[in-house]
Amino acid sequence: MSERSAVVIVGAGMAGVQTAMALRELGWRDDITLLGDEPHPPYDRPPLSKAVLLDAAAPTGAGGAKGAGVDVRFDVDFDALGVDLRLGLRAQALHAADRTLVTEAGPIPYDHLVLATGAYPVALPGTAGLPAVHLLRTLDDAAALRPVLDSRQQVVVVGAGWIGAEFATAARQAGCEVTVVEAADRPLSGVLPEVVTTPMRGWYAEAGVELRTGTPVSAVEPGAVVLADGSRLAAGAVVVGVGARPATGWLAGSGVELGEDGAVVADDRLRTTAPGVYAVGDCASFPSARYGERMLIHHWDNALQGPRTAAANLLGGDERYDPVPYFWSEQFGRFVQYAGHHTDADTLVLRGDPDGAAWSVCWLRADGVLAAVLVVDRPRDLAQARKLIARSAALDPALAADPAVPLTAAAARA
């Protein structure tokens, strides 16, 4: 082995960039190579469904990630950081036995490898290659949707999840006529209980968005979306937001274990089953002692936090990764935040009126420990809840149900 060691990071999104930065901050002085399969300088994804779509000066996708109005590039000087950034280069295979990454430009040897390939959006069956059907994951995806908003086309959004609601919000703000189609009987049916999602239905109507639930898409035709009940919706553009899958297909046969969900199976130190290989962000699952199950988290905060743990352990540390999951969504004039993780077995406690302007929901375990919280325009509840969840604090259900009582005051005294 050469005197210098090499770290190769596959994926130049939030998780990959944060890994490179954490390695330098924690003292790694040897080579770092960061591979990105897009041609654009590394950029932040959350603004793609918000500011980039609505800014008239947003990028077109041809000249990089910077527009005259919105700049979503990470503020990182990779040259100064000593990171060899290689853009437009896709990983094709991994030979873990001899520590070689196979790319379109040839093999790249490594001493340590960090997988940060993220996830890809799930397409609607039968729509591949249709010009009017859009996904929203990359900068180029957002750029392709700008003309749709600019020309105020009739838009059909497939999927009433987080991304569907966010795009519908942006499209309405741009003046588009919007219909959201959801195969389930309500928005976010696989994520939140009915008592929480029922009020959200009203948000769509309030914003002038038609919400069609319990109606799967049967086909997409030129200018129309055909539903399973035979109805047809006029559509100048169709935006699909029905979930995402870990971008790990290229790892088949590599020696890196993949779960049934397609995620890299990492341990609680973010190590994979291949020697010297770590995994962070949307592409990897990890066991949570806090929640007693394996977690796969497709959210920005996970891509921000995990890299520091992976970098510390790559450098010889022994740090466990067990965060309090967190995400947010801006939709229909509301700021929705969620922290923690709940199950159907947890007790739901409402704080405030879900039909009101601001309210929260807490989930308590059988022992009263706060497992999760969802807040709508109550940021103080979110800030307090994250700390309470982190220390496994138990809450008095009666006090927690009173929105006038701070959550910290509802915590049982030690």
Image (cartoon, rainbow, N blue to C red):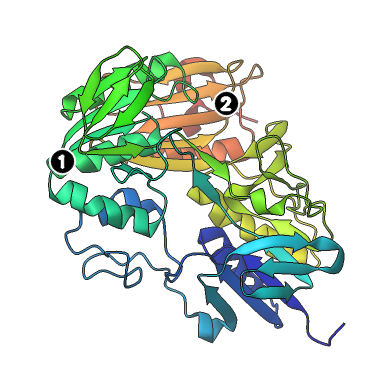
Among the 4 quarters of the image, the one containing residue 366: top right
Query: Considering depth in this image, is 262 or 25 the residue closer to the camera?
Result: 262
Tags 1 and 2 touching, CB below 8 Å: no
Amino acid type, callout 2: His
Task: Identify the residue shown where x is 15% and y is 28%.
Answer: 208
| Above/below status of 404 relative to 109 | above
Query: Considering depth in this image, is 93 or 375 the residue closer to the camera?
Result: 93
Task: Identify the residue shown where x is 34% and y is 43%.
Answer: 130
Give coordinates of residue 25: x percent, y percent: 62, 74
Residue with the mark numbered 2 = 342
Instruction: Report helix, strand or loop for mark 1.
Output: loop
| Above/below status of 155 relative to 203 | below
Sequence-wise, the earlier of marks 1 and 2 is 1
Q: Is residue 67 visible?
A: yes
* Quadrant where the N terminus is found in the figure: bottom right
Give coordinates of residue 413: x percent, y percent: 60, 29
Instruction: Report helix, strand or loop for mark 2.
Output: loop
Number of other residues with Cα within 10 Å of mark 1, as a class: few under 14, some 14 to 19, many 20 or more: some
Residue with the mark numbered 1 = 153
Question: Image check: 1 left or right of 61?
Answer: right
Q: CA distance from mark 1 to mark 2?
A: 39 Å
Give coordinates of residue 312: x percent, y percent: 72, 64
Number of other residues with Cα within 10 Å of mark 2, as a class: few under 14, some 14 to 19, many 20 or more: many
Query: Considering depth in this image, is 105 or 360 the residue closer to the camera?
Result: 105
Question: Image check: 107 left or right of 79?
Answer: right
Give coordinates of residue 238: x percent, y percent: 29, 37
* Quadrant where the C terminus is found in the figure: top right
Q: Is residue 335 visible?
A: no
Question: Image check: 369 left or right of 58?
Answer: right
Question: Image check: 309 left or right of 375?
Answer: right
Amino acid type, callout 1: Gln
